[in-house]
Amino acid sequence: MKTEEVKFEDLIEKLKNNFSESDLRDIKKAYDFAYEKHKGMVRLTKEPYITHPLNVALILSDLNVDKVTIMGALLHEVINNAETTEEEIEKAFGTEILSIVKSVSTINRLELPDDKESSAIYLRKVLVGLAEDVRVLFIKLADRLHNMRTIWAVNPEKQKKKASETVNVLIPIAHRLGIYSIKSELEDLCLKYLKPEVYEDILKQLDATIPELEEVLEAMQDSISTILMENGIKFQIKSRVKSVYSIYKKLSKGKKWNEIYDILALRVIVEKESDCYLTIGLIHSKFHPLPKRFKDYIAMPKENMYQSLHTGVFGIDGKIFEIQVRTHEMDEIAEKGIASHWSYKEQGTRKIQNMMEQKLEIFRNMIDSYKETTSDIDFAANVNADILGDLIYVFTPRGDVVELPKGSTPVDFAYRIHSKVGDTTVGAIVNDEIVPLSYELQDNDVIKINTNKNSTPSKEWLDFVKTTAAKSKIKSYFSKQDRTDYIENGKNILERELRKQKLSFSDVFSEEKLSKILKDLKMQEMEDIYLAIGSFRYTAGYIIKLSTEEKHNVTDALIEKVSNKNRTFPKNNNKNDIVVGEYSDILVTLAKCCKPVKGDNIIGYITKGEGITVHRADCPNILEKEERTISVSWSDNNENEYFTDIYIETLNDKNYVSELINKASTKNINVVSLTTNDTNDNTMYNLTIKVKNATELNDFLDSLYTLSFVKKAGKK
């Protein structure tokens, strides 16, 4: 199958009206760099390799993206497929371009291990986590579109694998970014390779009726044009037959071919928003509208900024037509999404910038969730709800539209309005009726939140709130509250101890003495001392002894605490990972040198001024320091995850990053960082990962030996 030949001049022709001469020179520099790096390389389609990045840039040029995105598209394969160093890219193009090219390169090394939803979620997680600059996703989507256009050149198994990956991962992201032009073509291409018989059958049925359909479309177009011209409305009109994928979706829901009434579609583009409503009214005055088919996405835009009026009417020959009416700007956003206005950020167009920032905030929330969440299941739920799931549109009493994930509650709504509103919520009225705070909101609900400035959040809210943002803000409130309670508790304990010893606060904590105590304990202010006492890290008596300059150090305090059998400590307070002696309320630190995980044999080391540091029992840094070690053990009730370092030694014949990450994914292991070190004979991969315990870690290490290229793997 021969593909149309493209040249760099084609790209410049498309860009010249939107870019300065200086910008075009930078783009030419990026093209020349990529051309030299890919020289002599050929794709499976038998074309020079440079045609791929050039086509990706051409696809993006239709979206009106900025110069950096075009340059990133031209350079996006120079690391993976041209052995270019990061230093070369940074020296030639700067850190911004390097960052984008690195992110695209990392994404392109990842593959979907299987067809399971968990695998798709993992890849979505990586995509969102890496794409802190949304332009990385623009390039990835265009990269996949060109690869899908030329995927006929690879074997059928890989065709299906890539099509499945595209459906599960990239099409939903294209939808959320509002890039319809890419989303629609990807849908048709994926159907072609995943269900070729269905695709061909729909094409045949369409082809059989195309002449008739085009004739009816032309007649309907002429009729609407006449109405609009008679009423002095400036317009453009486009007609199309519904896409193969759209028809497939209708058929897959049980409809028969002769029951799909909206195969014919017309789009009317007008000058002003008011003309949109006037146009719909004029069309309805001549053609009878279908009941319940009118949708106003102008007053209530979709989550991807899509705005348009939709209606269905009985038109020429009694056929049903789907009609969309929108302005030129709405049409551009509908086709290209936020990519079409990326460069507006620099030009100060506030409306576009605000819309774009709202959409990017969804991705940033997911990135924050990725950093905080230890569970893949939790993260998957957040991704599906906040990015890839269904959304609803509700209203404030003033008529402002608020977008929320389906299943959201009045508490989610309150926190979307403002953190203070969420924190002080006491009740909700939906559509003039009082509802519980756990009520599941519906499309078009009007919500009024009742607040009380003296009220605070309830931990029970965490059982029913839907949005990541609401959960995060509720947890944050209670985290701050716990700190406040500890400080208040510590202050009371210290005051009681001072009264017991008949000492005055001003004498014990004079400016000079307080400065010394803070320095010894490596603290910043008096509040930190209260916190340490209230959380039972140090006793009030020990703090007072430090002030009176008695020879009493941190080591003494910890030993005193652990050996003091008469002192009462909080029961069932297993917030910590480690139990020291009989106590789980002593704050400890896991050693960074050996990074113990639950299940390892461990030992505590009392560090002057630092408290207790927990090492693996075989850690070389602890073997000769028995005089300051102390018995410690793992808490039974804690289910945290732990950072640990491992090494993987492989053959030195290719880059195995993708395979290693995929293996980690199948074992539900979170890879935090990865570095490599090459020698003549092998490549050493150094990974920092998160695991629940030593059993999970050892299971993962054992599984690595199922990979033929792995020579050795172990804990550092």
Image (cartoon, grey):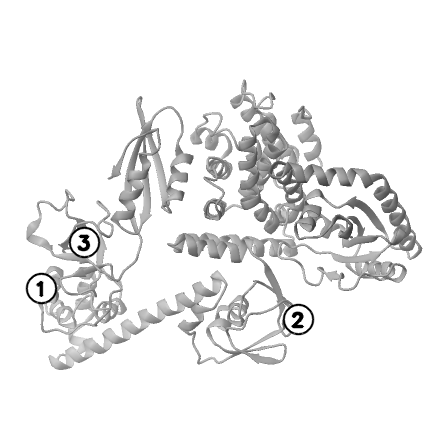
Disc 2, SS: loop
When the figure is inspected, residue 210 is found, relative to residue 412, above or below; the finding is above
Mark 1 — residue? 552
Residue at screen point 29% across, 43% down: 699
CA gap, disc 1 to disc 3? 19 Å
User: Where residue 254 sits: x, y (%)?
Assistant: 68, 53
User: Where residue 398 sits: x, y (%)?
Assistant: 65, 73
Residue at screen point 59% across, 45% down: 171
The label number, if any, that marks residue 399 in the structure image: 2
Q: Amino acid at mark 2?
A: Gly
Work out whether mark 2 precedes mark 3 in sequence or the reverse, and give the earlier one. 2
When the figure is inspected, residue 30 is found, relative to residue 305, above or below; the finding is above
User: How would you rate the neighbour count of disc 1 (Cα within 10 Å): few for under 14, some for 14-19, many for 20 or more?
Assistant: some
Residue 73 lies in quadrant: top right
User: How would you rate the neighbour count of disc 2 (Cα within 10 Å): few for under 14, some for 14-19, many for 20 or more?
Assistant: few
The label number, if any, that marks residue 613 in the structure image: 3
